[in-house]
Image (cartoon, coloured by chain):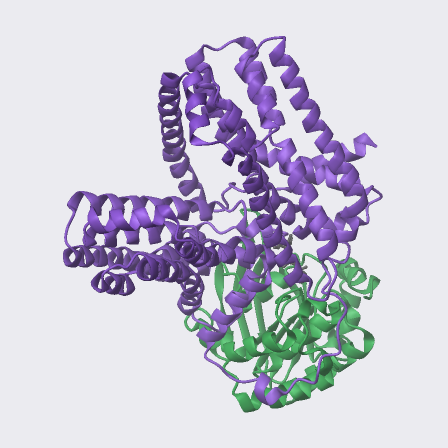
Chain colours: A green, B purple
Amino acid sequence: MLELTGLHKTYGKSVKAVDDLDLTVNKGEIFGFIGPNGAGKTTTIKMITGIINPDSGSIKVNGISLNADPLGAKQQIGFVPDTPSMFLRLKGIEYLNFMGDMYSVSTADRQARIEHLAKEFDLTRVLADPIQSYSHGMRQKIIVIGVLLHQPPVWIMDEPMTGLDPRSSFTLKQMMREHADLGNTVFFSTHVLEVAEKLCTRVAIINKGRILFCGGMESMREHFRTHASLENIFLELTSDAE
Amino acid sequence: MRSKLLSLTMALLRNSDGLGIRPTTPWGRRILFGSLAVGIPAYIYATVSLVQLMYDSLLVLDQTGVLISWGLAAASLLLLLISVVHVVSSFYFSVDVENLLYLPVRPWEIVGAKFLNTLAYQYFLTTLILLPVLGVYGAKSGFSLLYVLYSLVVILLIPILPLAVGSVLVIGIMRYANVSRYKDLVKTVAGVLAIFAVFVLSALLQRFGDEITMEQLEELIAVGNNSLIAITNRMFPTAAWAANALLQPDLGHGLVNLLVFAAISLVSFGLLLWFGERLYLRGVIGLTETGSRRLSPALDLTSAAVQHRPLNTYLLTELRLLFRTPVYFLNCVLMNLVWPVIAVIAGMAGDESINLAAEWLRNEAGPGMLLSSSLALLTFLNGTNAITPTAISREGSSFFIKKYIPMDVRHQLTAKVLSGFLLGCTALVGLLLLAIGFLELSPALAASLVVLGWLPAALTSYFGLLIDLFNPKLQWDSEQRAVKQNMNVLYTMAASAMVSAAVGYGGYRLAWGLLPTALAAGGFYVGLTALCAFLVYTKGAAAFHSLEG
Ligand SMILES: Nc1ncnc2c1ncn2[C@@H]1O[C@H](COP(=O)(O)OP(=O)(O)O)[C@@H](O)[C@H]1O
Ligand SMILES: [Mg+2]
């Protein structure tokens, strides 16, 4: 469960990246956070994960306030950032152990989950290799494995499909489904509407830091049809399926 | 063709961050201005008075020209040494290299552009070293227009040959180092090798000087009239032409020497381009990939995936990155490991000067003074440890990771301090080896060194991290920029030098016995370290929290 109230973030003096954002994402939901480039998706996600501090507003992760108990809130989250170029000089297994230790994953759980997830993503063979030698997609996948090691109640991803081949993309979507079905919250951003279709329980459309729509997929289509002024946004989100 | 070289050079220059001193935070600005306000006058005062002193003593012997000759040769040697490190980082480990490789330019144009960029940086250094020397000599011997003119030309020319020699050396070594799967390791070793090669080279150059006997030396001195230049010129043979031009700044002999020097410098640049055209690409291509992936043996997760305490894992990861990243290893780790090696070699060689020093120490200095000067030395050595002054900077664009993991910032900072502290303690080990093994110090003195000796490493580690927390350099695109041209390293060095001087001078003036000295020094270091640690965990942790990368 994710509760964002009155979030504001201004870069420098003038760039209002996020402007009075309210959002609630429930347990068991797969929530799509959709908006064109520069809409404020990454900024919002960085505030939820504690990477940057909001100018005002509050963030609660499963009822834990990020401000009052940052470590407790962060422990609830598994975060996949938008750039997979991290930990390049570590070996796959070293990165997984790092994440496991940061999130206090026991040896037994860790071994079982690494074995399962690595097989799922077809990375078992390369766990002993440096991440630097992985392809873009493989890097993305090892990061996802590291994030899922502690079975985060809230799983947050910033543009997770970018750079994944169709098969891995399918596997990832399946994992999101399974994770949500276990009663966890899944929250991801995308600039391609198509990615959210079929998968999401609910979506929010964000542009210029403001939420234009929040609701189910069906009512979103209806909303776009009846609000002619949103047509441009709609075109932007559908034009370049990546 | 020429315009391609020039536009490439300009593009690289624009893309670089100058000397890397541009502060990124208000704190950085304050620290920078403070240091400049104190540092520049202090530097000018110190160097000018030192050079004046040297000039006056040489004047008695009628050997003032040695100042110029020695200054130019020493600067050339220093530039050669620095060149190797610069070239390794900028020609090979810089990320922009990847982007240059697919441009429609010849290898020599890339090498040329990189060379000119490195040169631009070296002019700053050259000016810093040579200006006091050339300035004082000029002022004392009466400025002439030609002297000023020749000085300018010499400053412009002098870094070219050392940089060209260094580049050729590195390009040659890298051509053969770029082979195996273990690229990072090989690259690191190659870097160390190149530095070593320069040491050998400079030792060889100076060997020529050794053949002169004491008698000959006395004769030379007796002759006067700058006769000693014959020796100093040998330190770096080509610098002699530049020295001759400056010592006789006229349109005859002087001009000829200057022209010869210019010709040699330009030819060396040309040779480098020729060399680069042939060997550069083979050394650089594929450097950024990690070689072909082998089929790893199936990983045994029962031993490979085991839970550890977060602090240990964090520390281990810091150390892994330090040892595995060639630029970090060369700049942050190697210096620490060098001290014990030097100590042992110096001790084993049974060097005459060490024996003399030991004798003098036993007779003249009391054990209290020995302790304080040992601590002062350790503080100075630990001040050169670049690990914690770059601990935040090295995170670069990955800094955000350290903000979302659920690990207390203070524990993270402790792990970072430990990474610097552990490697810093090697200096203590070195000194202890030397002290106990070769200087035969009293057990009481050795014991107090063991008890107190790690404090300087703790102090400098906390101090370095404190500086980096307030003035981190997170915006970089190649690892070298995080550690080289990072002012925080210099600040830490300067602060440690001041503490070192205070402790050394205090111990000398007070001349207390061993126990009072140990108590006082212990209190001093514990107090300073506690202060720095307190600031790191309060103000520093807050700064960490508000950093947004
Ligand atoms: N570090 C930053 N400094 C200044 N402006 C930024 C920074 N990061 C993002 N912005 C600006 O904030 C806005 C939102 O960016 P972002 O959240 O990254 O969008 P998205 O992820 O939806 O593409 C954009 O206008 C972007 O230019
Ligand atoms: Mg984004």
- In percent of the image, x 38 and y 29: which residue is there? B41
Q: Is residue B48 left or right of residue B190?
A: left
Q: Nearer the viewer, residue B52 or B540?
A: B52
Q: Nearer the viewer, residue B224 or A145?
A: B224
Total tally of numbered discs in the picture: 0
Question: Taking B409 as reference, is A125 above or below it?
Answer: below
Q: Which quadrant of the picture is home to ligand 1?
A: bottom right
Q: Is residue B225 left or right of residue B280?
A: left
Q: Where in the figure is residue B339, as x and y percent of width and height? A: 43, 55
Q: Is residue B193 visible?
A: yes
- In percent of the image, x 48 and y 79: which residue is there? A63
Question: Taking B141 as reference, is B533 above or below it?
Answer: below
- In percent of the image, x 44 and y 73: which residue is there? B311
Q: Where in the figure is residue B173, as x and y percent of width and height? A: 69, 51
Quadrant of the image containing the C terminus of chain A: bottom right
Q: Is residue B547 visible?
A: no
- Residue A21 occupies which quadrant of the picture? bottom right
Q: Where in the figure is residue B66, as x and y percent of width and height? A: 47, 23
Q: Where in the figure is residue B504, as x and y percent of width and height? A: 26, 46
